[in-house]
Each structure stands twice: as structure tokens, then as C-alpha cells.
Amino acid sequence: MYFAILFLLASGGTMAATAPDLIRQGIATGEANGQLTDDVRDEARLNLNATGTLMLKVTRVFAFQQEGCARLRLDFVQTQALLPGASAPHDYEWSTEMSICSNGRPPASIERAK
């Protein structure tokens, strides 16, 4: 636990995580963020010709009536991305939204929780 706290402080308040872990945490608590260490990071590095870290912030937009399901906003920041035509690497940001349940499947109904 001590080392986890040290890492948290050293990394600016974010933990290393996988995208599915952060998505499940975002559904449960409303917000999650971390430095990705999974194949999502590897794919982003490949596509963006990047050498830096990939950060993900997950925010619950709203919950669905179906338990464990929510509409989420995913904000990504890939550091040190060298995009086509660029002379030097820079941070690249993008966002998307998705409707998902904690089991990885889409909700059966789009009725919002009251």
C-alpha cells in the first residue's frame, strides 16, 4: 500500500490502469482517471507515432435505469505524439462518449435512471 501511495503521488495523482478498469470505476463512482498500460495504449502509440504516456479520464454523463450501466465520456491525452506533417511531437487530445455496462455490454434499454 505504501508503494502504491508513493506511485500515486509521483504520477501526479493518477494510477496505472487498463481502460476496462477505468470504465468500470467510472460507471460505479462517476469518475476515474489513470495512465493506461494496456493494448489501448499500445494501439494509440502505434497510430500516433507516440512515445509518451496515454492518459484516460472517464466521466459518467448519466446513469441508465439498468443497474451497472451508464453513458460515459472518455477524454484521452497522448503525450509526445508525432502526427503526420508535424516537425516535433506534441500532446494530442481526443474525446468520445459511449453507453456501456460494467459487464462490457451495451445497456438493454436507454431509459435513464431517475
Image: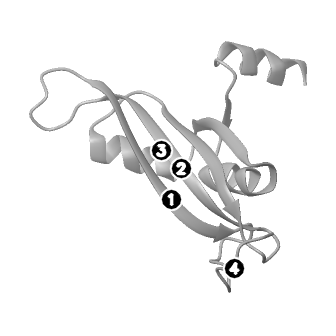
Q: Amino acid at mark 4?
A: Glu
Query: What's the residue at 60%, 57% (across, down)?
Result: 72
First along the sequence among labels 2 and 4 = 2
Residue under label 3: 41
* CA–CA distance in space, label 2 to label 4: 21 Å
Mark 2, Cα crowd under 10 Å, few <14 / some 14-19 / many 20+, is: many
Residue under label 1: 97
First along the sequence among labels 3 and 4 = 3
Of residue 114 and residue 75, the one placed in the foreground of this image is 114
Q: Residue furthest front?
A: 114
Q: Residue furthest left?
A: 85
Of residue 58 and residue 52, the one placed in the foreground of this image is 58
Residue 1 in picture, x, y percent from top left: 90, 25
Q: Nearer the viewer, mark 2 or mark 4?
A: 4
Does residue 108 lie above or below 19 as drawn? below
Q: Are marks 1 and 2 in contact (CB under 8 Å)?
A: yes
* CA–CA distance in space, label 3 to label 1: 18 Å
